[in-house]
Amino acid sequence: MAKNITTREQDYNQWYLDVIKAAQLADYSPVRGCMVIRPTGYALWEAIQGDLDARFKATGHTNAYFPLLIPVSFLQKEADHVDGFAMECAVVTHSGLEASEDGLKVKGELAEPLVVRPTSETVIGHMYSQWIQSYRDLPVLLNQWANVMRWELRTRLFLRTAEFLWQEGHTAHETAEEAQEETLKMLDVYAECVEEFLAVPVIKGQKTESEKFPGADTTYCIEALMQDGKALQAGTSHNLGQNFAKAFDIGFLGRDNQRHLCWTTSWGVSTRLIGALIMTHSDDEGLVLPPRMAPVVCAIVPIYRKEGEKEQVMEACRNMLVSLCGIKAVEQAESRLGNRDQLAVFFGEGHRQQVILDMRDTKPVEKHFYWEQRGVPFRLEVGPRDVAKNACVLKNRLSRDKEFLQQDELSGSWLENKIEAMQSELFQRAQTRTEEGTCFVDSYEELKKALAERSGFVRCWFNPDVDNEQKIKEETKGTVRCIPLDQPGGEGTCIYSGEPAKQQVIFAIAY
Amino acid sequence: MAKNITTREQDYNQWYLDVIKAAQLADYSPVRGCMVIRPTGYALWEAIQGDLDARFKATGHTNAYFPLLIPVSFLQKEADHVDGFAMECAVVTHSGLEASEDGLKVKGELAEPLVVRPTSETVIGHMYSQWIQSYRDLPVLLNQWANVMRWELRTRLFLRTAEFLWQEGHTAHETAEEAQEETLKMLDVYAECVEEFLAVPVIKGQKTESEKFPGADTTYCIEALMQDGKALQAGTSHNLGQNFAKAFDIGFLGRDNQRHLCWTTSWGVSTRLIGALIMTHSDDEGLVLPPRMAPVVCAIVPIYRKEGEKEQVMEACRNMLVSLCGIKAVEQAESRLGNRDQLAVFFGEGHRQQVILDMRDTKPVEKHFYWEQRGVPFRLEVGPRDVAKNACVLKNRLSRDKEFLQQDELSGSWLENKIEAMQSELFQRAQTRTEEGTCFVDSYEELKKALAERSGFVRCWFNPDVDNEQKIKEETKGTVRCIPLDQPGGEGTCIYSGEPAKQQVIFAIAY
């Protein structure tokens, strides 16, 4: 048992922070509520970025970049939007500092304060109004990778921080139908990335009026169930209707030679996904990573006691590297980093994943914890006796099983198969937990009991209503996570109002 | 001649802006001095990022992310640094806005103002002081891709904007020698990327005291000569000595069991490189891109007048796409974007460059300007008569020559060869211009004359001196761009002081 990690049973919140610390994923920074994403954590974000960016481009989107600072007057143009975001913005009021007797003082007060973007609908809307003239300019399908800020009171690494990294897609369309199609298409893209790449099962649904994005007609989301029974919103896709088109006059000359307003959408996921990843898969030993996304997919650990044993063990390790990654990749890595004690060799296509030969002069038990706590899916260990038998030991991070292998069994496709098997197992395990963590209730009493006793996803017939949802939240801490797209059809009785209800919703206590 | 582009001879500055506008690379934003990078421009940044990031990783660096906002007290810890940056920072003083009778007002004044990072040495230094304990933790080799802000008075798209995108490397080492080695290694990495990938020739050198980074012991740079004879600093690498280690107490327990301070470096390039690229290669017809980096390397343009000709021309175009990119890539593109009028197919390894079949319903002459002004290196045109002869026409963006080809000459390696040939030619052309734009002078009179008449790089023996450099700048507008690493050896006479000088420098008028 790792001494630096609290167990989930003891204290789930502390466990989460301990896992992050042990894997060196992130730290709090000296600026309140802002985090520092350390290399191990940032590599996860790079993996997610790579996967999502390819999916965005495959669906016809391109990237662009818009200003960090937004004039306050822009926020005010859309009434719901300003109510939703203006209260907790970082506000830039001055353009410099100057020396004074008491140290540095602000100087150069701005005529109009600027806010650090909490999201970019407004400034992008302004630019779209200039770029779009005719229906021939549509659709506009852009995405931005950026940092944003929302001054949160209670922060939690990755899940809720004042500054975070995200992507925000912003599209403009000729018709309402196209905007709706785009909104749902990007929801699917998110669900596919999160399920296939992060191995986190999600439920696709629509937000109720009280939970939707400020300024949207409709917000869709993917919701995932964490190990402690709480729900986590993993991504959102908004149909903005003509709200921002009206506010920023995003119009075009249509096929009928008349001027029309565009229909716009926006959609985003953030570094929060790393929190979802940690809380879905990790265990009391530390981080567990889905092998398809893991930046380091396998660590090879040489084990020897005497200097005389080192050479033959290292030779066997290098041969194993060659079997897994090919001689060309190994030689490239050797020429790059000849003098470092972790030889990192690219594995597979795309130069994204690595196999590492850990040559550090530290004890095997330290290496054991090092790779376990960083969630590396596979570890291959070789000692002098293994060398004699042409054998090695495979340790599986997920099952924590040992497997004795002949070295000549190793190959690139062998590792690919191992990756696929563990990826499926991980997803299946999370899927089963989500199913077991979901129940159906017929009455408000049952809902209260379910949320109090076991949390999880609680499904029921319900008529969304801002006031009723507020009352339920006060009584149970639960909120409607979504109206699932997948509906049984037919009609039931709303558990709160007793009136006929046409849809089921999912309640849960959320992060 | 393109009517929307002023010629270089008429007005070089207007030409630069016209090229950017015609290629839709960037726009000014509603926030003063901040730019919007449009998709065509952002694709150039993505190409540069991809190339540099691979070079950083190949030299053992990993990426991380640090906070956008920096406490004012951090800036103050290094005296030169605060003088260099504090005067023109965006300052966050409040944490929100609230409604009032006159609209939104700031609320939640912060106890200590925060600045939007102009660069991150201070906050990264603070984190390093916590992370580094022992010589075993060294070296730390991190890089950050980020946005930064410096409130510039005079802005110019890509070259000087209030907000810009960049990467900043930050490393910490055990010895002064290792820090110096790293500083020069990253200068080499920059020079290789800029020369090999952007085809922009550079001179590597050291900055004089008056031009170095605030807080550095030594600053190295790469300098490039633009078509108008002005110099552009394309990247800098700083040996920070122990200055930031002292200010932030970045120490470690050494091999001798004593506590020591680290030696740190930092190095950066920015979206300014896109400006360098434009001003080095482009012509009066618009943007010219180095074919190795061009996001779109070739456009295939079908030409037909009657609907009856369309089918056979389109079939020939698709066959050409298959010859260049392979059937698999074409089918993937078709399945992705079945309903769009520009079929973009990945070309070559790495899924980075594309060949586009332009099926838009616009006139050939419009397509001609469209691809010319976007700097696409090659264009293949096919009309009905070409189809009959199994022929096509290749248009070369750089030479603007036509070449008549048989369609069966086309293949992936044919295009690779074309790319390599144009890339060399482009670099050679810029190299020749740089050489022709460089002169050697023996006296201050000659320097004044050279800078007044023709600008360019002016090389001479000179003893760097803050006061003398200031006087020369006032009289000639010229500054010492660098003390080139490549020195003739021996000794000369300083053109300004008349004293013996051990080194030559390069003067120029700079962007």
Image: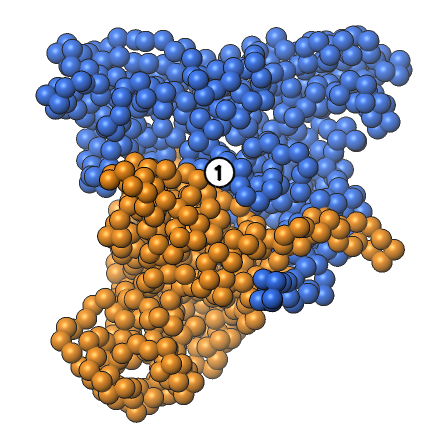
Chain colours: A orange, B blue
| Figure quadrant of residue B200 | top right
For residue A292, side relative to residue B462 (left or right): left
Left or right, B99 with reference to A215: right
Q: Can see residue A26?
A: no
- Residue at image mark 1: B37
Q: Position of residue B229 (x, y in %)?
A: 63, 15
Q: Position of residue A372 (x, y in %)?
A: 44, 63
Q: Front-most of B69 and B327? A: B69
A341 to the left or right of B150: left
Identify the element where label 1 is drawn: strand
Q: Residue at x 30, y 76 (%)?
A: A464
Whether B115 is drawn above or below A5: the answer is: above
Query: Dividing the image into 4 quarters, which one contains the C terminus of chain B?
Result: top right
Residue placed at 75% from the left, 57% from the top?
Answer: B73
Report how many numbered discs are placed on residues in the image: 1
- Of B497 and A186, the residue lying toward us: A186
Residue A494 position (above or below residue B253): below
Image quadrant where residue A113 sits:
bottom right
**Chain of the residue that carries numbered disc 1 in the rendered image:** B
Instruction: Residue B420: give x, y in percent of width and height.
Output: 40, 18
Q: Looking at the image, which residue is at 54% across and 15% down?
A: B8
